[in-house]
Image (cartoon, coloured by chain):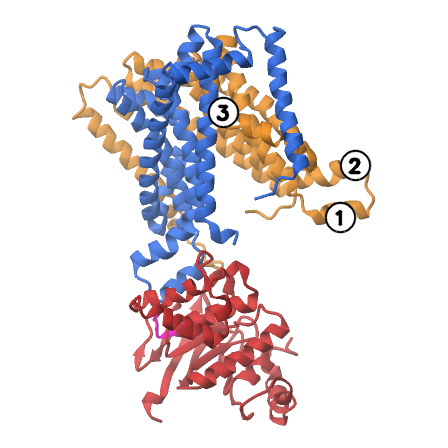
Amino acid sequence: MKRLRAADLVSSLLVLAGVLALWWLASHQQWISKVFLPTPEAALTSLADGLRHGELAGYTGATVLRMLLGWGLASLLGVLLGALIGSSAAARAWLQPTLEFIRPLPASAMLPLAIALFGLSPTMVLFVVAFGAMWPVLLATVHGFASVHARLREVAGALQLARSAYVLKIGLPNALPDILAGMRLSLTVSLIVAVVGEMIASQAGLGQAILLAARSFRASELFAGVMLLGAIGFASNALLALAEHRLLRWQHP
Amino acid sequence: MATWGMAMPSWRSWRSWRGAVVPLLLLAAFEWYARTVAASSDTLAPPSAAALAFVKALADGSLLAATGFTLQAAALGLAIGAGLGLSLGVLLGLSRRAAAAGFLAIEVLRPIPSVALIPLAMLVFGFGLTMEVSVVAFATFWPLLILSQAAARQVEPQLLEVAAALQLGLAARTWKVVLPAMLPRLFVALRLGVAIALVVAVTVEIAANPNGMGYALMIAQQSLDPALMLAWLFWIGAVGVAINALALRAQRFAAQRMGEVAA
Amino acid sequence: MASSDTVLRFDAVGIHLGGREILSPTSLTVRRGEFVCIIGPSGCGKTTLLRAAAGFVAPSSGAVLRGGRAVSGPSREVAFVFQDYGRALLPWRSVEGNIALALEAAQVPASLRPARVREVLETVGLTAHAAKFPAQLSGGMQQRVQIARCLAQQPEVMLMDEPFGALDAMTREGLQDELARLVRDTGLTVMFVTHDLEEALYLGDRVVALRANPGPGRPSLARLTDVTIPRPREQLATKEHPDFLRLRRELYGDLGHGHA
């Protein structure tokens, strides 16, 4: 973790302040119409009001819950399946091409199919969130297990390590850096699919809120919602990075 | 396990087809299921019907039109996002002070999910190409910024020392040493950018924009045409695989030309 | 010779890999408490022979017998020390954790493990570094951790594949002496592969010289020599001993020096 020098911190704050000042100017001077760009104060007031008196807090909670549930399910399934597939060269050979085909598919593309199957419901969105978020974790886990160095496998053989012990003591720790990277990607996907799902399935949440705000030309509410989504993205990533740092302490003793 | 000089063609080609068995089996199973158990369903259709719908959409031009729109939006968005991201990223990577100055602003703006900007883009640009291009540009800007910054920072320090020893000026140093050294990693970043551009473009179409492949997919489902919906789902996946494969080729070619040992 | 004295017997062990004969049928025995060094040029199959003894490679003909039974796979009784120590240690476990792996695999009760780990750490002189991770250790120390883990297996025989090859000269000499002392104290049976003739003569009771590219009339086993240099050995004195110089001259050609 690089130590922030005082001068760096100051220059960084200055640049950020500069960006905010630019926003302030652009909106007050009407360089961009207030219909599209609210003033910073208006956006912040909208945010504060929405959280205190309005339903923004509830929407935020709904989106976060959707994101976390889907991500949690996805990670669990992804790691389990990934461990199974990754530790067997035969399984990998049979399944890898199928997995590689699903990789580039946008997770949101499953929404129409899910709507067809489950209708417009919170379960439907959760299903797609979990489905979409599973693949990065699964693929990362497969890679993590497959990349156990031949030497370590021979050591396990020489020590006559039982299969379950091998998976828990060698396979999993070896795969952990990859798994955590996959989970970080999954978290991003979960948020995206949760938001898109809310937009097209009219489920209560930030996605729907900002879509409605745009449709009714309420720019400050739109910006408030976007800021909250940015905050969710920031917080979830930061927490996961912290967990990664703790779990992978051996990489930076 | 090296097999020096022992080519066993029939064995090898069986091995390489192994990967196709599972998807074919799944397709066959789904075909059977859709024709028997779900025969009267208006939400599922057998793959054979989807294939027919695909051919029809290809014949009447709707497939190519929609695909063209999505690819166009993705390409334009990537051009803008990558162009800006690469330029700024290289600058920040080469100048530690600039990187430190930009740190907070980047960390505040970067976490905003690109989909959150769809309603804003809709508000400002309405529906159509510009709206989608702007969201794709935003989505591709950040990863390319971060990766090109890392690529510039990771130029082998000894190469820079060699450049200094040869007393190369700033322009010569940048053009002859720094940029070529970064090129393989920049291509890796671009490959990621291509993948993101395509995914975001389709996502924008699914969420809001009434154009392109994502919209066609949504419309097919909404008009209760499961065969067409499945055809689009498959086609979107296929386009993704093809574009990603092309990008990988380009990346490998660049690495090879720049003298990197094949991964 | 009493059979309980023989730890390993190579019974006309021949190995083919990738369509080539790496090792022509080779026979030799390793007695309990012996330190056998295997030398030879690149490609002579010395590592392959060792891996066959460990059960990582199955011989194409003949068999390796341990305790009268053919070796069919890896076993805890046979400890193997790899040359690339960095890859043979678990980077996410501390030194103690790495050694404990051997005990966990052998299902030693958890209460007994700390004492055994401590014992082995003392033997290799790493007690002060028990809580460190492999990334924090020098090459020589990492190799000692590997040796410690092998000792924790309480093996019948220890097989070492060019264990000091990747280390600098000073570290190598230090570890050679430590290994010699360890073997003397525990009476461990060792098979040691090296390309360094002086190392083989310094450490070994017997030296097995192998040939590369065996053919009719040119079996893999070129020479079996007893090292008559007295013990305990010392880095400077031993290398000036007349027997050392004589054996060195005799075996120099076997390493492939001076061949076309």
- Few, some or many residues within 10 Å of mark 3 (<14, 14–19, 20+): many
Chain for numbered disc 1: B
Q: Residue B224 carries which label?
A: none
Letter of the chain in orange: B
The vertical placement of A116 against A131, above or below, is: above
Q: Residues within 10 Å of mark 1 (few under 14, many from 20)?
A: few
Q: Do labels 1 and 2 share a chain?
A: yes
Label 1 sits on residue? B161
* Closer to us: B75 or C62: B75
Of circles 1 and 3, the one toward us is: 3
Q: Give the camera-side residue of A130 and C44.
A: A130
Q: Mark 2 points at which residue?
A: B170
Give the extent of the magenta segment: C75-79
Residue drawn at 38 percent across, 25 percent down? A193
Q: What element carries label 2?
A: helix
Disc nearer the start of the sequence (2/3): 3
SS at circle 3: loop
The residue located at (38%, 42%) in the rendering is A96
Give the CA separation, mark 1 to mark 3: 39 Å
Q: Residue C39 in magenta?
A: no
Mark 2 to mark 3: distance in Å? 36 Å
Query: Which numbered marker is on residue B112?
Result: 3
Label located before the other in sequence (1 or 3): 3
Residue C73 in view (yes/no): no
* Residue A209 horizontal/vertical position (percent): 39, 14
Q: Where is residue C24 in the image (x, y as percent from the top left)?
A: 45, 77
Q: Tell me the chief SS of the magenta region.
A: loop
Colour chain C appears in = red
The secondary structure type at the circle numbered 1 is helix
Amino acid under label 1? Glu
Task: Supply the letter of whichever chain is blue.
Answer: A
